[in-house]
Amino acid sequence: MKKTLCLPIVLFFVLALSSSALACACCVDPGYYEISTSKPDDYILAQLEDIKFDTATSLYMSEAGWDGLRGLDDLVKDEEAGKSIDMNIVEAFLHKTWKLTIKTASGREGTLVLPMPVSMVKFKVDLHDNEPGTETGLYKEFRFKGRVGISTGFLKRGIVRPTTYFLVFQGRGNGCDSSADFDHWRLELDGPKAQYAFYGKVVQ
């Protein structure tokens, strides 16, 4: 009888300890910092497939305005003509390649095909802004830098070889990585005739 009663209790503590161990596998200590370069494995590829761009996107512009940008002459003409350049984006990640189609309110459309580079950079850091007594949370980034493949529409004119892209996913989380951690993205284009960046949110 005693053995029968003890068995459920033992199982309860075993399961409790297992859950605690799994949770702590993702815990980090205060002051944590990591920057590493690695080849994306199958797990990371699956997370990238789950990261979906929100449709609304913005063009980054500093105080220099259009003078600080290159490669978007059609958008400059639209704004000078009083047309809206508000943008939406349609994104797809397939066969280790991002395909981004950007449409403006004035009716222009352009596509960028971005083959994923062989390696990526992971950046994670404790910003020391956690509430006292809570688990240490991290600011984190997935960074990808490669060469632009195909470009079309209003984006085509500024994309000549070798134009590079820098795609960053930004978010918060613990020591383990998940698509749910990331809530923003930023894409920067840089080349002989292109220098501009888009940014937006990730669908949660």
Image (spheres, rainbow, N blue to C red):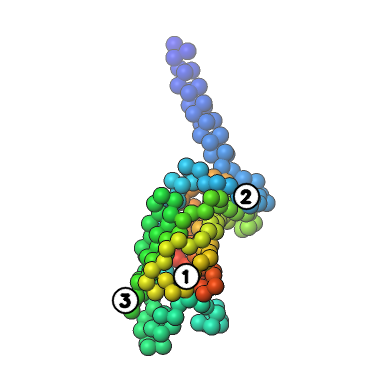
Residue 152 x %, y %? 38, 68
Q: Which residue is mark 3?
A: 107
- First in sequence: mark 2 vs mark 1: 2
- First in sequence: mark 2 vs mark 3: 2
Contact flag, marks 3 and 1 (Cβ < 8 Å): no
Q: Amino acid at mark 1?
A: Ile
Mark 1 burial class by Cα count in 10 Å: few <14, some 14-19, many 20+: many
Residue that appears at 54% across and 59% down: 145
Q: CA distance from mark 2 to mark 1?
A: 29 Å
Q: Left or right: 101 with respect to 114?
A: left
Q: Check disc 2 and report its element: helix, strand or loop.
A: strand
Q: CA distance from mark 3 to mark 1?
A: 20 Å
Q: Check disc 1 and report its element: helix, strand or loop.
A: loop
185 to 87, vertically: above or below? above
Q: Amino acid at mark 3?
A: Gly
Q: Which residue is mark 2?
A: 36
Does residue 51 show up? no
